[in-house]
Image (cartoon, rainbow, N blue to C red):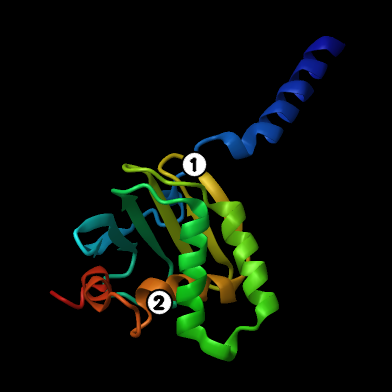
Amino acid sequence: MLKPIRLLIGLTLLLFSAGSSFAANWRDDLPNSKLIGSGELRWMMLHIYSAELYMEEPVFDPQKKFALVLTYHKSISRDRFVETSLDEIKRLKGSTVDTEILKKWKGYMEGAFADVKSGDQLIGVHLPNVGCRFYSKDKLLTEINDTAFADAFFSIWFDPRSKDKDLRKKLTGASK
């Protein structure tokens, strides 16, 4: 009688400890989402990534829940991705973000992201009043419970001063 209970406890502990390795899907965060807009990031003649924006709302609102799906067409190192993201956040936020906060945000990104190659996906889900989650094509990479970071990170694509205004318009449906 005792052996089945031990087996059940052992299986429960195994499943609990392995829970983070099970595939998680960003669509669980936005079950009724629809494509709002899509576009491409190109630099010179290079096709860097395709981007898609999904929301449950029909009109883009950066204060609502959304998912930004990036499908890479070029290999990019994690370090380059992190540094480029930080540079863009600094450009957009200016002196409103101090050095210590930027170090913390750099740590978040270094922990969340890996090198990407053509075909890889990175999905960022904006969770108002919580922060954000990052997924690969098939699993949850991390959850960051920092709303200021989430807002700063997604501003790279959605701030009106974004470097690629055309991509911003296409993603948010403003170019329709």
- Judging by the rendered image, the residue that carries numbered circle 2 is 62
Q: Residue at x 46, y 51 (%)?
A: 77
Q: Name the element at disc 1.
A: loop
Determine whether, in the image, residue 20 is placed left or right of residue 39.
right
Can the viewer see residue 166 in this picture? yes
Determine whether, in the image, residue 39 is placed left or right of residue 82.
left
**Tag 1: residue type?**
Lys
Residue 175 image position (x, y, % from top left):
16, 76
- Judging by the rendered image, the residue that carries numbered circle 1 is 139
* Closer-to-camera residue (171/129): 171
Q: Quadrant of residue 20?
A: top right
Q: Quadrant of residue 123?
A: bottom left
Q: Determine whether 2 is above or below 97 in the image.
A: above
Residue 105 image position (x, y, % from top left):
61, 68
Q: Residue at x 40, y 43 (%)?
A: 137
**Tag 2: residue type?**
Pro
Q: Determine whether 40 is above or below 101 in the image.
A: above
